[in-house]
Image: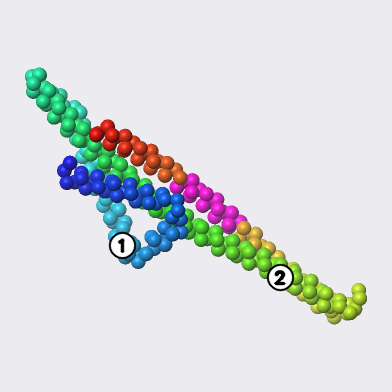
């Protein structure tokens, strides 16, 4: 292989290694997000989009060049002389095999480059949704504890006012109790509404998280199929 195709092949192997790392089950999306937010990546962020587009253009050019080579050697025919025919046939076959190999290498490199970008985006979004869901769950638990506390305070206040008075509390105490009960009802209603909203947001986040997880699994399956196809082509080439 020439230098450019050797470079593309090495780039393809690096892509496969990175995607395998991203697929490791014991590294959570939250941990990957912390890795993505390291200072070294932040300093390279402004060059990332330009480098990503430049690599896509480079791989597309190589892919089109390899496709042209495949068509070129597929349409050529050996000469009529049997000896020349055999030699030229072997030469053309080698050229055609090399062009097809380059076509597969550049095509898989281009596809995995797009898949890797998409996987990084999905992992980052999934980690953000996990953090949001955890925050909403903490808020819901806090609202539940506040509602229980208000109910306990209400019951304690009622017992204090009725203590020593039998079933007949003073008019002032009853009025104070009614005001306190109304206040607690309003606070409880506010807390209940906030709790319902938190649960609704948590369910929405969970549904979105499930959708991202399904998309992540689909990309993993596609990557596995492509890797199997690449292995098959390598075995045929060997």
Q: Position of 80 compared to 40: left or right?
A: left
Q: Position of 77 compared to 208: left or right?
A: left
Image coordinates of residue 196 in percent, x first then y, are 65, 59
Residue 3 sits inside the magenta stretch: no
How crowded pointer 2 is (Cα within 10 Å; few <14, some 14-19, many 20+) is rated as few
Quadrant of the image for the N terminus? top left
Q: Nearer the viewer, residue 88 or 136?
A: 88
How crowded pointer 1 is (Cα within 10 Å; few <14, some 14-19, many 20+) is rated as few
Is residue 164 placed above or below 114 in the rendered structure?
below
- Please name the residue shown 51% across and 58% down the image: 130
Q: Which residue is mark 1?
A: 44
Task: Identify the mark nearer the N-term, 2 or 1.
Answer: 1
Q: Which residue is mark 2?
A: 149
Q: Nearer the viewer, residue 46 or 220?
A: 220
Q: Nearer the viewer, residue 115 or 178?
A: 115
Disc 2 is placed on an element classified as: helix
Magenta part of the chain: 200-216
């Amino acid at each position: 292989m020439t230098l450019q195709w050797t470079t593309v092949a090495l780039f393809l192997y690096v892509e496969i290694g990175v995607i395998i790392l991203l697929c490791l089950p014991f590294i959570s999306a939250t941990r990957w997000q912390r890795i993505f937010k390291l200072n070294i990546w932040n300093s390279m962020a402004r060059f990332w989009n330009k480098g990503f587009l430049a690599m896509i253009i480079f791989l597309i050019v190589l892919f089109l060049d390899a496709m042209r080579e495949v068509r070129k050697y597929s349409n050529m025919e050996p000469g009529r002389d049997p000896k020349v025919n055999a030699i030229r046939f072997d030469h053309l076959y080698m050229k055609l095999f090399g062009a097809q190999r380059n076509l597969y290498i550049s095509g898989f490199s281009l596809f995995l480059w797009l898949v890797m970008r998409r996987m990084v985006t999905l992992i980052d979004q999934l980690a953000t949704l996990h953090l949001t869901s955890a925050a909403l769950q903490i808020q819901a638990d806090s609202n539940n504890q506040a509602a229980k506390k208000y109910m306990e305070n209400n019951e304690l206040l009622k017992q204090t006012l009725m203590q020593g008075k039998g079933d007949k509390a003073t008019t002032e105490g009853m009025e104070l109790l009614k005001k306190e009960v109304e206040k607690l009802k309003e606070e409880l209603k506010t807390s209940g509404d906030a709790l319902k909203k938190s649960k609704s947001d948590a369910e929405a986040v969970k549904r979105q998280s499930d959708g991202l997880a399904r998309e992540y699994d689909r990309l993993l399956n596609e990557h596995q199929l492509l890797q199997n196809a690449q292995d098959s082509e390598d075995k045929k080439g060997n």
